[in-house]
Amino acid sequence: MQKDVTIYDIAKLLELSPATVSRALNDHPAISSSTKSLITSKAKEMGYRSNLFASNLRRQRTNTIGVIVPRLDSAFMSTVLAGMEKIANKSNYNLIISQSLESVKKEVANAKTMFDSRVDGLLVSLAADTDDLEHFNTFFRKGIPMILFDRVMPQKNCTNIVIDNVKAGYDATMHLLDQGCKQVMHVTGNIKRNVYADRLKGYKMALVDRGIPISDELIQLTDLTRQAGLDMASHIRQMASPPDGLFVVSDFCAASCMGALRQYGFAIPADIAVVGFNNDPVSQVVEPNLSTIHYPGQEMGEIAAQTLINHLNGLLHLNTTNSILLNYELIIRQSSQRTKAL
């Protein structure tokens, strides 16, 4: 392997002092423009690379933020990461991104990697089976700031960024009831996570407010994959009394289920009205277009990154901010909109 070019190599070749070369490469005003031009030109020719890591260590900063997400193949998470990248780039920070693949074991390994990489701060959305935040204790003890977003749990001096999932679940369910649905099924994920537990709570609240009994048969816990949607359609087909409304907490799973239901002969929304969640691109591709809750992913990413960077730059103290609540929107499309109540 070829040895990296150093400022000492450049200095020796140009018969200048290493200090002069270093100052020129850092655009020091004491160095003349002609000397800077000579040194930067030679550095480029020789393939010199600035050792930002060593420089940042001297300043006790790496200008790097760690990000841990459950999955990278999520349309919602892609928009979150896009928001984070936008703010990080503007603020001259880099992101190290890893995925837990919904496993706390992998999340523990990711946390160690981030700590060993000396990230200045951490942005985390928790895995499906995470029970506590013990694996982040090294960050808390060292005073390295951490923000939880989307999938969160209470933690002292740790800001959470979420939407009101209870209200969103309530609104989605109430919309189906307003369309005349009498028997609404709720398809959700692992209720260890706040997002699914809270949407389930909102679903139940809507039923109670309308005087409709809560049925365990109409609450289905799945992994919200495409296959889960297909399996759910098959299950509905075999039910003695199929639901006339379906609230699925994932657009991708909802779209998969809806397509299979149509193949089984169910008319949507006439037989089963459907509402998803997240406003993923698939919601406007599937036929009929899917009603959904718009979850502001890019805004969440931007706010998470900006809040953390403001803290790192001394403009904000995270221990004064326990939770940031973002707005959501119920978007009504053809999949749930009936011409008249049944």
Image (tube, grey):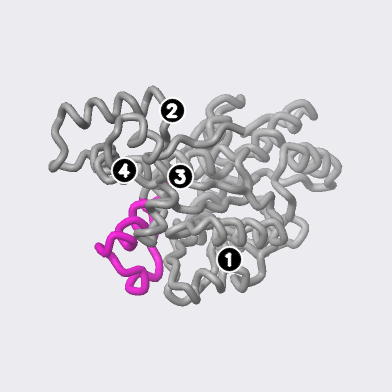
Residue for badge 4: 18
Relative to 125, does residue 80 appear above or below in the rendering? above
Look at label 4 and name its amino acid: Pro
Relative to 185, does residue 273 appear above or below in the rendering? above
How many labels were placed on the picture? 4
Residue 127 seen: yes
Residue for badge 1: 208
Q: Which residues are magenta?
A: 303-330
Q: CA distance from mark 3 to mark 4?
A: 48 Å
Q: Residue at x 57, y 60 (%)?
A: 116
Residue for badge 2: 47
Q: Mark 1 and 3 residues: CB-CB less than 8 Å, in contact? A: no
Q: Nearer the viewer, mark 4 or mark 2?
A: 4
Q: Quadrant of the C terminus?
A: top right
Q: Residue at x 37, y 59 (%)?
A: 58
Could you tell which of marks 4 and 1 lies nearer the N-terminus? 4
Residue for badge 3: 297
Could you tell which of marks 1 and 3 lies nearer the N-terminus? 1
Q: Secondary structure at mark 4?
A: helix
Q: Secondary structure at mark 1?
A: helix
Q: Residue at x 62, y 51 (%)?
A: 70
Q: CA distance from mark 2 to mark 3?
A: 40 Å
Q: Residue at x 59, y 40 (%)?
A: 74
**6 or 258: nearer the eye?**
6
